[in-house]
Amino acid sequence: MFSRKQFLQRSALATASLSLLEWMQPAQAAELKLHLERIAPLAPSDAAKDEDFWNLIREQYTVSSTIINLNNGGVSPQPKPVQDAHIRSYQYCNEAPSYYMWRILDQGREPLRAKIAELAGCSPDEIAINRNTTEGLNTIIFGLNLKAGDEVVLSKYDYPNMMNAWKQREKRDGIKLVWVDFDLPVESDEVFVEKFSNAITSKTRIVHITHMLNWTGQILPARKIADMAHKKGCEVIVDASHSFVHVDYKISDLDCDYYATSCHKWLCAPFGTGFMYIRKGMVKNVWALLSAPIPDADNIGKFEAIGTRSFAAEMAIGNAIDFHYLIGSKRKEERLRYLKNYWCNKALKFPKFKLFTSMKDEYSCAIATFTIDGCTPADIATELFEKRKIHCSSVNQEKVQGVRITPHVYTSLRDLDKLVEGIKELAA
């Protein structure tokens, strides 16, 4: 039996899915609707293996037929319904830009904010729509009131743009950065919590957590770290660039104070879209990064005074959310993890193959990074592309030197079989 909350959630998802189907070709929409009804009773882990359904999802993408893109962690393609929505709004704006952008299309900003907040699990007045994780987290990092001697705890495996932002504050303002190190993969919540805890002193003001490391896909126990940090009087920032709608959770589950993500990764929204979150009541503590009428106001809108932007791209975020609801959050997570497990379990049988990513569900999902003894990351990536046209990403960060493989919902098992063939040849 479903609870009332579950019933309402399913009803909302069904409505979103149906609204998106209206934008598709009638025959495609009808077929997809039939498959959605067919897999609805299945557990997400079982639906993850239903190739007929996922082949239909693949058909919604206009991806290359000659290049196998396994670097979706960098930026993901948009499904055609999202592309179409973006293009329609873009052409509409070009009829009279200043009128249609600022007087017509921007009227959708507050409904879009509410839609993002519902998906993210927070209040609309805690969300600022922007262009990416870097912009969101830099706004927070440079906007916080920190003074010389204040300490910030962060990891050597955080994203470079965030580490550089903190280093700039260290150089400019005299704050102290305290670095936490790991031997990846880590398969213990306690190890993470202890390392962060040991780095905190009476001078620590901020704990910066990357929820899912871009280098290896390692998932950190963000909530446990946040709870510990709060008990010690620290505020918590979460970099959710790779975890948002990749794994199924809400911002409220993390109990963080600040948070930012990109919508052009796992949500498959237009390039250059994202949002940041600041816990209600703490907005006034963060100065606006760019000019705003009242830069220290208690109003999330002060962070959106960034000048002319792509209204068309922002409005299409809503269509990307509908597409995400159509697939289903948990079903999507299980499919992404299934794809990673599919190729990793095959490759682990090869000599010289080494994985920097955990195979345990609670510590990884789609992303996995590997190396082959005797090969450099550049050699592996070059060989995979030149011989099999597999596009992937090289990693060279601290103790991780390897190649990152990042499939997405449109990735086929046949694509991954070609990856495994390439790895087998290199490992032989």
Image (cartoon, rainbow, N blue to C red):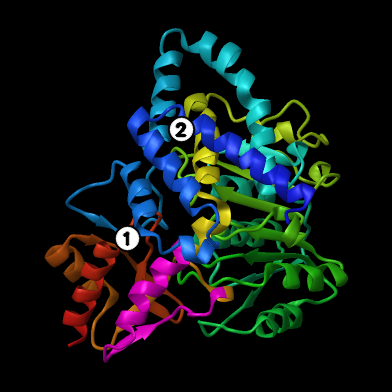
Q: Position of residue 91 (x, y in %)?
A: 39, 17
Identify which residue, 336 or 370, lies in the foreground: 336
Identify which residue, 73 or 68, lies in the foreground: 68
Q: Position of residue 243 (x, y in %)?
A: 56, 59
- Please report the residue visible at 75 percent of the width from the left and 55 percent of the height from the top: 252
Callout 1 secondary element: loop
The C terminus, quarter of image: bottom left
Q: Is residue 289 visible?
A: no
Quadrant in the picture for residue 1: bottom right
Callout 2 secondary element: helix
Identify which residue, 178 or 249, lies in the foreground: 249
Tell me if residue 242 is in the magenta stretch.
Answer: no
Look at discs 1 and 2 and give the one toward the viewer.
2
Residue 238: which numbered mark, if any?
none
How many numbered circles does the render carry? 2
On screen, residue 128 versus residue 268, left or right, reads: right
Q: Give yes or no for contact between labels 1 and 2 (Cβ–Cβ under 8 Å).
A: no
Quadrant in the picture for residue 197: bottom right
Q: What residue range appears in magenta?
A: 335-361
- Give neighbour class at mark 1: few <14, some 14-19, many 20+ (Cα, 10 Å): many
Residue 21: which numbered mark, if any?
2
On screen, residue 375 versus residue 323, left or right, reads: left
In primary-sequence order, the first of circles 1 and 2 is 2
- Please report the residue visible at 24 percent of the width from the left and 88 percent of the height from the top: 374
Q: Amino acid at mark 1?
A: Leu
Q: Label 1 belongs to which residue? A: 70
Identify which residue, 230 or 339, lies in the foreground: 339
Give the residue furthest to the bottom: 351
How far apart, in angstroms, are the residues tagged by discs 1 and 2? 27 Å
Q: Amino acid at mark 2?
A: Leu
Q: Is residue 173 visible?
A: yes
Q: Position of residue 318 (x, y in %)?
A: 55, 34
